[in-house]
Amino acid sequence: MAIVPGMTDLTRPYWENANAGRLVTQRCGTCGRGWHPPLPACPHCHSTDLGWQEVGGDGTVYSCTVVRHATHAALADQIPYVIAIVELAEGPRLVTGITGCAPEEVRVGMAVRARFRPVADGVTLPYFEPT
Amino acid sequence: MIRREVAIVGIGQTEYAKALPRDAWDLAIEAVTGALADAGIDPADVDGMCRFAAPFEPVSEPMLVRALGIRELTFFAQSPLGGEALGAVVAHGAAAIMAGLARVVVVYRALSQSKGGRFGRADRGVPDPAVDIVVPEEDNRSFAWPYGLMSPGQLFALWAARYAAVHGLSAEDLTQALGSIALTQRRYAHNNPAAMMRDRKLDWETYRQARMISEPLRLFDLCLENDGACAYVLTSADTARSLRDDPVYVLSATQTLSPYREPMGIYTEDLLTLFPPATAERLFAQAGVTRGDVDVAEFYDATSFMPLRSLESYGFVPDGQAWRYVVDQGTGPDSPLPVNTHGGHLSEAYLHGMNGVLEGVRQLRGTACNQVADAAVALVGAPAGSAMILAR
């Protein structure tokens, strides 16, 4: 059992790209700026000419917590796990998880890189690991 | 500006407990009728109602209108975003009274977490291990839940961890600061007959050894989960003075919304700037008082980190210094600014900040369990800028 994202027309490209191993953020076709999570119009120039841009996958941990108490039965066997907010080199921040090291080794400011992780049939989510 | 044009003339509450054998609307009726009795107002004369928006408030206006025997509501409004409704409901009620849309406005908050689901649990019942859980997209929840960010306490842990990193706190520094708040509030609760934790001692050893829930937050850094209800009654200053000798005046109230609040500010430009600094300046400027005039503060405390950060964000202590301040000066009865004198959400009960409003009123009436001597001005505020300043 996994917890997987439901999708709307707006959010589907993000998750479909993740399934294909690509990390993307929404990008304005008019003014060129990017952001996350997705919006129906550019928050800067209000253009609706929007696309998706692949980002490099490098980032730093903006904040993190080691969760030691499951708030959902589906997470009981994952305790302890790390929730992190990662700031991408391109600017936008993502909520994600950190793998590839012991939970207590994760620090704010740590350099991390995207690593895709299958969590359920047909569902691959972007996680991050220390570089 | 509201400045003393509107007053709180009645307060009411139910008992608070982990599980009460009553529905939320039963509790709401008791709190509202209690507040109206305290005000000396016939329930039939209520013509305004302000409440937290669903799903935060489970009891709708139509349910209460019939139960209370109200003739007609001429103004009713809901405020979204949970704790962000705390100051908004007062602002809406006061605006309605000042605009002549209503004369007597009831504000209430009822909770039945034992029946309606605990805020600290994201699941309802036992999930089928063979079936994946699909998180419906709503306010970016589908970007957080798959990573196990499913409860408010986990997000507040991210706030606290960011604070510690930005200001260079060691784990021990943060423990001392958060523990100081938790223990101080517990001591206040010992004098409060309504507090769920009145008889439960909390010492440093117990605090430190309690299990980590979501680092750096331990069990006693997180608020209670409970059933109960709170209500208060707003009316014009003139009517208030005809009803009682000790009305508590509303000086100002704020509601605020800036980009990236969904969900709960995870993506804001600065995770620690939960509301624009201008909001706090507006709160004080419209009230016509300064920080130094405030005798007591009741800060919304879903976790012990919130009062700490609120001391900074409302401008009582410079940014990055409250962790030291709460250790050196404290928030107790003899501190420069007593905070959460009823025990707060950590030790009285969790009512989305509404029990803090009631405590502010008692302090200004001079009837609080932990009375601050000669209290004349109180600030009641949520961490994201929804607040009020009250005065006797």
Image: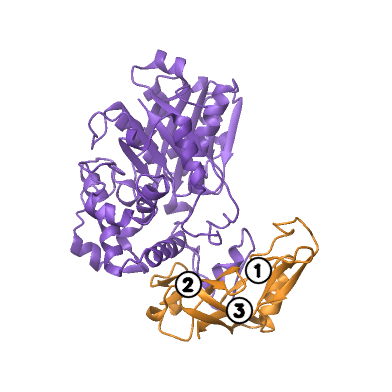
Q: Which chain is purple?
A: B
**Label 2, label 3: how far apart the Cα atoms are:** 14 Å
The hue of chain A in the figure is: orange
Residue B91 to residue B124: above or below? above
Residue A71 in view, yes or no = yes
Q: What chain does badge 3 belong to?
A: A
The circle on residue A83 is 2
| Picture quadrant where residue B32 is located | top left
| Picture quadrant where residue A30 is located | bottom right
Q: Position of residue B67 (x, y in %)?
A: 51, 30
Q: Do tag 2 and tag 1 residues touch (Cβ < 8 Å)?
A: no
Mark 2 secondary-structure assignment: strand
Q: What chain does badge 2 belong to?
A: A
Residue occupied by mark 3: A125
Dot 2 surroundings within 10 Å: few (below 14), some, or many (20 or more)? Answer: many
| Type of amino acid under label 1 | Gly
To the question of a shared chain for discs 1 and 3, the answer is: yes
Mark 1 secondary-structure assignment: loop
- Screen quadrant of the C terminus of chain B: top left
Q: Report whether A15 appears left or right of B3.
A: right
Residue B30 in view, yes or no = no
| Type of amino acid under label 2 | Ile
Closer to the chain start, of discs 2 and 1, is 1
Q: Position of residue B36 (x, y in %)?
A: 42, 25
